[in-house]
Each structure stands twice: as structure tokens, then as C-alpha cells.
Amino acid sequence: MTGHRVVDVYAWLVCVFLMVPTIIIIPMSVGPDRFLQFPPRGFTLEWYGAYFSDRDWIAATLFSLKAGVIAAILATVIGTMVALSLVRGRPPGRRAIETLVVGPIVVPHIALAVALFLVFDRLGLTGTLVGFAAAHTVLALPFAVFSVLAALRRFDPALEMAARSCGASRWRAFLNVTLPQILPGIASAALFAFIISFDEAVVSFFISDIDGKTLPRKMFEDIDYDLSPVLAAVATLLTALSVVVLLAAHWIGRRGAARGAV
């Protein structure tokens, strides 16, 4: 067996190892037993019905959706402006800005969660949609910046300069020339920001309250008090949503690369 095949086999084994826990949870979500069991002794969709008919589960899901959409919009807008500043401009302290952008990834989430809780508690933002959107925007911002940065670095700035030499203002050149070319990167940034917000658990655990809680926070509560297959059903739905969003981001990225190649 050649070295290339060894690497391929090793890569597939790692993928299988990472996917096994997620794959196992799917059959557990359709088992008829009252508690989680693998392998299941039958088939039922009762637990999915229990999720969709439970007011608390739906309220937590809608809260997560609202926070995710707001965080995605804010992170994408701010991330696009930061990326444009880093690529097109020469801001003072550029290295410091890049370091700060990476900060939410480098800093442990538990430390960030404690800091956000202490600040939000004083400001009265604990358990509020505004508080969750702000916190998740901070967490998603690095991924939005990186996505737009990648799109900008694939874009030829000479095209924008050509538009400006033809009389277009900087703003019109950006809207008519640059923006359509980097739009796939911006869309990918929004998708990544949304899924990061929707799946985030550690920070949500600290800044939630009785009424304002996200879906991951609700799942933590049920792990403590009611370890039922509804959890497996919710986890399966979350996994499906994540896969759909990642596939959409990949498809958008490939279309953007193909457009750039043309």
C-alpha cells in the first residue's frame, strides 16, 4: 500500500470516528423506549411529535432562530466592513485588529461566557434577545471576516480600479463591480454566522434566564431533569440543519469560484 493510500485510509477512519456519535443518535431518536437506548427495539416518530407539540421546545427554537438571524446579519455586515478595511485600506494598528478579530476563537468560551455574564447582568441584557444577538455576533464575527477576506483576495482589484477610471465613484464601483464578485463569500459568511449562533451552548448557558433561553440551553436542562429520546430527536434535527447550511455554504463557494474562474 502506497503512502498516498495510507493517508486516504487514515483520513476516512478519522471521519468515521468523528461521525459515529452523530450517526448513533439518529436511530436512538426513533426508538420506542421512554429513555435513550441503543440499538432501538422498534421504530416510532413519537419523540419528534413530542418536540413539535411542546410549547417550551418551540419557544426555545424560535428564540434561537431570532438570535441566529440577527447575529448573522450583524456579523456579516461588520465582518464585511472589517475585511474591506484590512484588504483595501491601511488602518493604523492593523496587526492588532487582526489579533482582536481572532480573539473570540482563541479565548476559551467558558472565560468569554463568564465575562459576558458579568457585563450583561449589570446592563440588564441577561436572557434578552438583544443580549444573545450581541454575544453571538462576537462569536461569529471571526468566521464572517475570514469568509469575506477569502472572497476579497480572490477578487482582482484592477477591475474596481478600471471602473473608477471610467468615472465611477468608490461607492458605485464597490456596488456594481466588487460586491457581485464577493457576494458568494458574504453569503457563506452569513450562513456560517447563523449556524454558529444557533448551535452555541456555553455562552448561552451563562446569559440565559427562565424565559429567554436558546435551544442548546433547553437541551442542557433536559439532560439534567428528563433524559428522554426527545433530546435525540432535537439533536438529529440540529445535525440536519447544520449539514444543510454547510452544504449550502459549500455550493455557494463553488459557484463563486467558478464565476471567478470565468
Image: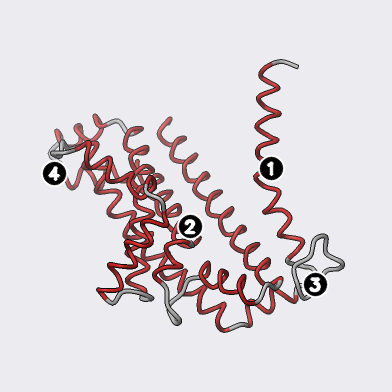
The residues bearing labels 3 and 4 have C-alpha atoms spaced at a distance of 62 Å
Q: Which mark is residue 17?
A: 1
Disc 2 marks a residue whose amino acid type is Ile
The residues bearing labels 3 and 2 have C-alpha atoms spaced at a distance of 28 Å
**Residue, disc 4:** 169
Q: Which one is in front in this view, the residue at disc 3 or the one at disc 4?
A: 3
Asked whether the beta carbons under mark 3 and mark 2 sit within 8 Å of each other, the answer is no
Secondary-structure class at tag 4: loop
The residues bearing labels 2 and 4 have C-alpha atoms spaced at a distance of 36 Å
**Residue, disc 3:** 44
Secondary-structure class at tag 2: helix
Asked whether the beta carbons under mark 1 and mark 4 sit within 8 Å of each other, the answer is no
Secondary-structure class at tag 3: loop
Q: Residue at x 38, y 54 (%)?
A: 140
Disc 3 marks a residue whose amino acid type is Thr
Please identify the residue farthest to the top as the structure is shown: 2
The residues bearing labels 2 and 1 have C-alpha atoms spaced at a distance of 23 Å
Pinpoint residue 210: horizontal percent, then vertical percent: 45, 81
Quadrant where the image shows the C terminus: top left
Q: Quadrant of residue 134?
A: bottom left
Q: Residues within 10 Å of mark 3 (few under 14, many from 20)?
A: some
Q: Residue at x 60, y 72 (%)?
A: 224
Instruction: Report the side of 32 relative to 160 (left or right).
Output: right
Q: Which one is in front in this view, the residue at disc 1 or the one at disc 3?
A: 1
